[in-house]
Amino acid sequence: MFLQNTFNFSTFNFQLRNMLTKRIIPCLDIKNGRTVKGVNFVDLRDAGDPVELAEIYANEGADELVFLDITATEQRRKTLVELVMHVAEKVNIPFTVGGGISSVEDVEILLNSGADKVSINSSAVKNPQLINELAGKFGSQCIVVAIDAKQIEGEWMVHLVGGKVPTDIKLFDWAKEVEQRGAGEILFTSMDHDGTKNGFANEALAYLSELVNIPIIASGGAGTMQHFTDTFIEGKADAALAASVFHFKEIEIIDLKNELKRNNIPVRL
């Protein structure tokens, strides 16, 4: 008589993810070669040179960096390979690049230029098979699917082209699909919270974290160190991404990590 194997790998993966070191990720939105930041994806203001900021964040203890060319998809431009090369020369931490990426060739160029990962968003929604192709060629660990969503009549709905184009795709359905297609991580940005500094969308993040077995990066709403603590505890996020609080020196990364450690959240110091 054989005993039934009741080991639950999904539960094990979820528990393992929550034991791993939590990551702090400054995000640099790029427009015309400059770092910019706005509120709810609009009202952009200049925040500095992206390469200089990248070097500062790497030295201050950031775990990773994300560069998003926020006009690349809208204006049908390719992400600036030159920027990637300059960043790769200056920083020694992993960084992700996104914006206007729509083919295997795009990804190959960016990875060969020094990027560690790529982020795809609109192109993945328009051609979901692209996720399979990229994961198959480069490995899931290189592929981040960014999802911008906002609540419409109580339902989280996916938006494209820097949040400008609504779709009828539900956030949680799409998240599950991108995992099944081979994405290595999901970067979820709440458009409702973006730039407001009122905290992350922790309820949605917690559900996402339980729904999929790949890491979830929380984005949109960071304003205080408590917000980071909350998103790791309540939102069960694997990483937290922020922009303006770092760009404008409202929060220092080392201070944030020390605060997280005091709250028994595992971080790399």
Image: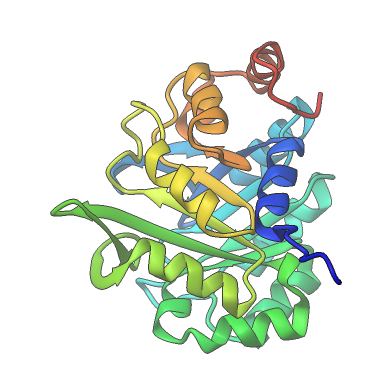
User: In the image, is residue 232 above or below residue 255?
Assistant: below
Name the residue at 82% across, 65% down. 3
Q: Position of residue 188 (x, y in %)?
A: 46, 53
Q: Outermost residue, front direction?
A: 1
Q: Position of residue 38 (x, y in %)?
A: 34, 40
Q: Nearer the viewer, residue 86 or 27?
A: 27
Q: Nearer the viewer, residue 205 or 47?
A: 205
Q: Position of residue 61 (x, y in %)?
A: 76, 29
User: In the image, is residue 182 above or below residue 95?
Assistant: below
Name the residue at 77% across, 69% down. 113
Q: Quadrant location of the C terminus?
A: top right
Q: Quadrant location of the N terminus?
A: bottom right
Question: Quadrant location of residue 185?
Answer: bottom right
User: In the image, is residue 17 above or below residue 258?
Assistant: below
Give the colour scheme of this rendering. rainbow
Q: Nearer the viewer, residue 106 or 128?
A: 128
User: In the image, is residue 199 above or below residue 260?
Assistant: below
Q: Position of residue 58 (x, y in %)?
A: 75, 36
